[in-house]
Image (cartoon, helix red, strand yellow):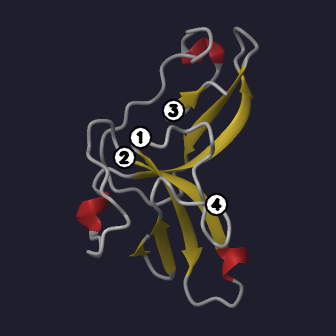
Amino acid sequence: MQQITVGQGWALEIFGAGATPGAGTPGLPRWIPAESEYLPARLRRINVADVDAHACDLVAAWPKGVPVPDPDRAATWTDDDLAGVLLVHPREGFRCRVCGGRVNALYPDGGLPSWGGRHRYATHCPLCGSHVDQARLHALALFAP
């Protein structure tokens, strides 16, 4: 696990893809491939009495083709290790307006920290192939359940 201070009063914790959920450790949703550009993350307030009440479980997304560093290595990460990272919310059960199927998605949030980079957003429904404009499924990534 790596912890990086973000802004004033916030810490970003990034865990290995194989992290076991529970006991203060977020895991990736089961529908995200473990060997991918996504790692479980938690953004939390620093120096507050009830840490869990001030924490948000997220997914750290690296741009495709950028090597994802190992958060379990001994060396402390710097901002360079987060180059291109975007923090996103995992969401389940969105309905495609074309085929009616349910898909899972990773949604970026403009209010969350990011470290630049170019990400390709999803362009088609993973179930029927319809363009996201028709399907109304705008997200960073879409996954079949």
Say what secondary structure mark 4 lies in: loop
Residue 103 location, quadrant: top right
Instruction: Compute the Cα span from label 1 to label 4.
Output: 18 Å
Which SS class for mark 2? loop
- Tell me which label, 2 or 1, sits earlier in the chain: 1
- Amino acid type of the residue tagged 1 in the rendering: Ser
Amino acid type indicated by mark 2: Trp
Circle 3 sits in a helix, a strand or a loop, which is it?
strand
Q: Considering the numbered disc 1 on the image, is that residue within a helix, a strand or a loop?
A: loop
Cα separation between marks 1 and 3 = 12 Å
**Amino acid at the residue labelled 4:** Pro
Determine which residue is flagged by label 1: 36
Q: Position of residue 130 (x, y in %)?
A: 58, 9
Query: How far from the left and from the top, in percent, is residue 45?
Result: 58, 79
Q: Residue at x 55, y 9 (%)?
A: 129
Q: Are marks 2 and 3 in contact (CB under 8 Å)?
A: no
For the residues labelled 4 and 2, the Cα–Cα distance comes to: 21 Å
Please determine whether, in this image, residue 144 is positioned above or below residue 124: below
- Name which of mark 1 and mark 3 comes first in the sequence: 1
Circle 4 is placed at which residue position? 21
Q: Which mark is residue 62?
A: 2
Q: Which residue is mark 3?
A: 141
Q: Nearer the viewer, mark 2 or mark 1?
A: 1
Circle 1/circle 3 CB separation < 8 Å: no
